[in-house]
Structures are given as structure tokens and as C-alpha cells.
Amino acid sequence: MDKIKDALTLTLITLIAGVLLGGVYELTKEPIAQRKIEANAKAYQMVLPEAVEFRADESLSAKVAVSDSLLRQSDLAMEQVNVDNAVYGYDGTGAFAGLIVEVTSKDGYGGAIQLAVGIREEGAAKVVSGIDFLEINETAGLGMKAVEPAFKEQFQDKQVEHFELTKDGAVEEYQIDALSGATRTSNAVTNAVNGALYFAQESALKQ
């Protein structure tokens, strides 16, 4: 009898703890999301200059939660790419300006490379408005050249289905010149941007 009583007591305690933890999560998830936006606001502004305000969205967060399986459905090489977060951007009038996607490639030479990618709509098309780095630890003088405008701006204001890396000089809109001596870094960044773009294309920017 005592064993049954103890088991019931333990079950009740577990249920109460679960309810309390769930309540704490609901209370804290919005402030946590807002702090993340504030921390990365400078990068967001750089990649989506039209936007002055950035907001988290529950339906968008739900899409991020299932994005891994979405990316694996693509024919592109995105096995090492993960969408970490996404927020909507709005201009000074409150009008929708575009989407910010935080995306990580785990295939950098020096480890994970995390980007903020801005994507806006032009009619039915998705346009990459810019990229900026949230985390990168590549080799100085080689892979770290990815943070320089000459490399980053290759992605800017491009309306393409996806990007492809080239070592022979970019001649097409979708081609990206690889950094000399840092092909792996270049490839990781390109795959990450493709992941963000594919997420936007398949999940739609705004419902």
C-alpha cells in the first residue's frame, strides 16, 4: 500500500512540475525571442535595409522547427545546413519588408558558420537583399575574407533559385566566385545562403 501511495505522490509531483515548467516557458519564450532580435538587430538591419522593426512570429517559428526535414528534401547539398531562427521585418510605415533567416552551415573549415540572410519579395520572386555573419572562425587571410564586402556583396540583390560556387570567374547571376585558398569556407557560406533561400521559397515569406 505504501508503495502505491509513494508512486501516486511521485506521479503527482511530476505532473505539477511539468505544468509549472510549461507555464514558465510560455511566460519566457516571448522575452527570449525579443532579446535575440535585439542582439542581432544590427546584422538584421544590414541585410534588410528597408526594415526598421523586426518581430518574431509563432507560425514562422513552427516552420523553423520542421526546417531540417524541409532542407533535406532539396536536391542541393544542404546536409550540414540548419535554419536556426527567422523573423519578419517591417518598414517605417509598418508595411511588411521581408524575412530574416538565421542559418548555420556546420561545414566551415574552422567550424560552424552562422549567417543572417535578408530576403524580400518582388512579386512572386524571392530576392536575397544581403547577408551578414553572426559567427565565423575561419583562417585569417583566407576564409575570414568571407566577411569582406567583395565576397558578401556577390549575394546582394540577387533574384535566383539558388547559388552555385565557381572557381572560374562568375559570369551568371547565380554564380559566386570562391575565395582563393578557401573553397571550403566559400562552399559553406554558399550552402547556408541556399538553405535560407530554400526555406523562404518553400515556407513562403508571409501568410
Image: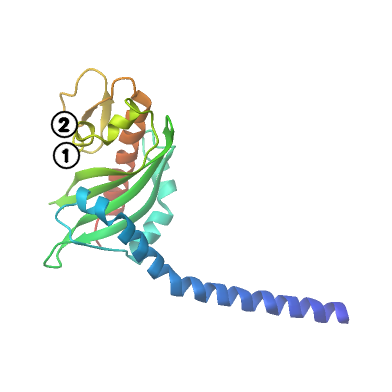
Residue 206, percent from left and from top = 24, 60
Q: Quadrant of residue 34?
A: bottom left
Residue drawn 42% across and 29% down? 109
Q: Residue at x 16, y 39 (%)?
A: 158
- Residue at mark 1 to residue at mark 2: CA–CA distance: 7 Å
Amino acid type assigned to the residue bearing label 2 in the image:
Glu
All told, the count of numbered labels is 2
Q: Quadrant of the C terminus?
A: bottom left
* Image quarter (top left, top right, bottom left or bottom right) of the N terminus: bottom right
* Image position of 166 (left or right of 49): right
Residue at the spot of label 1: 158
Q: Are marks 1 and 2 in contact (CB under 8 Å)?
A: yes
Q: In the image, is residue 207 above or below residue 155?
A: below
Q: Residues within 10 Å of mark 1 (few under 14, many from 20)?
A: some
- Along the line of sight, the residue nearer the viewer: 187 or 181: 181
Helix, strand or loop at label 1? It is loop
Instruction: Say which residue appears at 32% left-offset and 29% top-offset.
Output: 186
Query: Where does label 2 land, which residue?
Result: 173
In-image side of 33 versus 145 (left or right): right
Vertical placement of residue 78 versus 20, above or below = above
Residue 53 picture location, percent across and down: 21, 63
First in sequence: mark 1 vs mark 2? 1
